Image (cartoon, grey):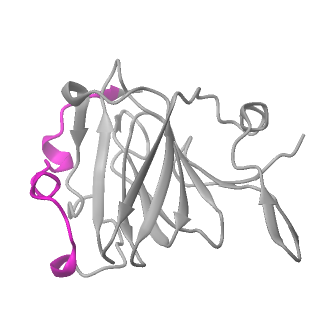
Amino acid sequence: MNLPAVEGTLLEGVLQIVPRRFADDRGYFCETYNSQAFEHVGVHSVFIQDNQSLSRQVDTVRGLHFQIPPFAQAKLIRVLRGAIFDVAVDIRCGSSTYGKSFGVTLTAENGHQLFVPTGFAHGFCTLEPDTEVLYKVSAPYSREHERGLKWNDPVVAIPWPINESEAVILDRDRDLPALSVLPEFFRL
């Protein structure tokens, strides 16, 4: 079995995954997802859908998004072109890391992926123009169950690598609630 390398994070369940690349003069081959291999390294989610986004501008912020039960989603994120600073925030009430975040740079070149289980808000900002992101999800999209967390909440204090004034963000994401007023959607 071709197992990817896995790097733990400060947030229980959030994993950095580094698939093995087999390179030669033509380029490389990489198995980006194998259910048996991922199960072996601790990813127990069943993915049912792939989503892809294109962000044309640098400093585009998407998130922080999540869905509530029964449509809560685990996500496996990777970059097809460009680069992002990818973030997960623990929103599981009762967790020892509640309100804490983990961020990592994912690029098409490094091929790293981030696994974000249910109970976490997720978002990213683009570091290069024309960045394409692909992410697998474990539940279908449901508008009625979609929620979010303010991307620049000072209590969460995500160390975004962009200036707040330069963020390219939709008004609906800019107006998301702060952690302090977020209902208890997930509880440990």
Asked if residue 135 can be seen in this view, the reply is yes
The residue at the point 31 percent across, 32 percent down is: 67
Quadrant showing the N terminus: top right
To which quarter of the image does residue 125 belong? bottom left
The correct choice, above or below, for 75 with respect to 8 in the image is above
State whether residue 78 is above or below residue 33.
below
Q: In the drawing, does residue 26 fall left or right of residue 77?
A: right
Query: What is the x, y in percent for residue 136?
Result: 52, 40
Q: Is 172 on the left-hand or right-hand side of 158?
A: left
The extreme top residue here reads: 70
Q: Is residue 184 visible?
A: no
**Left or right: residue 122 compared with residue 107:** left
> Closer to the camera, 129 or 187?
129
Of residue 80 and residue 107, the one placed in the foreground of this image is 80
**Which residue occupies 22% across, 64% down?**
152
**Residue 115 magenta-drawn?**
no
In the image, what residue occupies the spot 39% across and 55% down? 53
Is 44 placed above or below 61 here? above
Q: Is residue 165 magenta?
A: yes
Q: Residue at x 50, y 52 (%)?
A: 134
Task: Give residue 25's position: percent from left, percent from top.
Answer: 88, 77
Q: What segment is highlighted magenta in the picture?
A: 164-186
Q: How many marks?
A: 0
Relative to residue 165, is residue 56 drawn left or right?
A: right
Residue 118 at x, y = what percent? 44, 33
Name the one closer to the observer, 58 or 67.
58
Q: Residue furthest front?
A: 26
Residue 180 position, x and y percent, is 16, 46
Q: Quadrant of residue 169?
A: bottom left
Quadrant (top left, top right, bottom left, bottom right) of the C terminus: top left
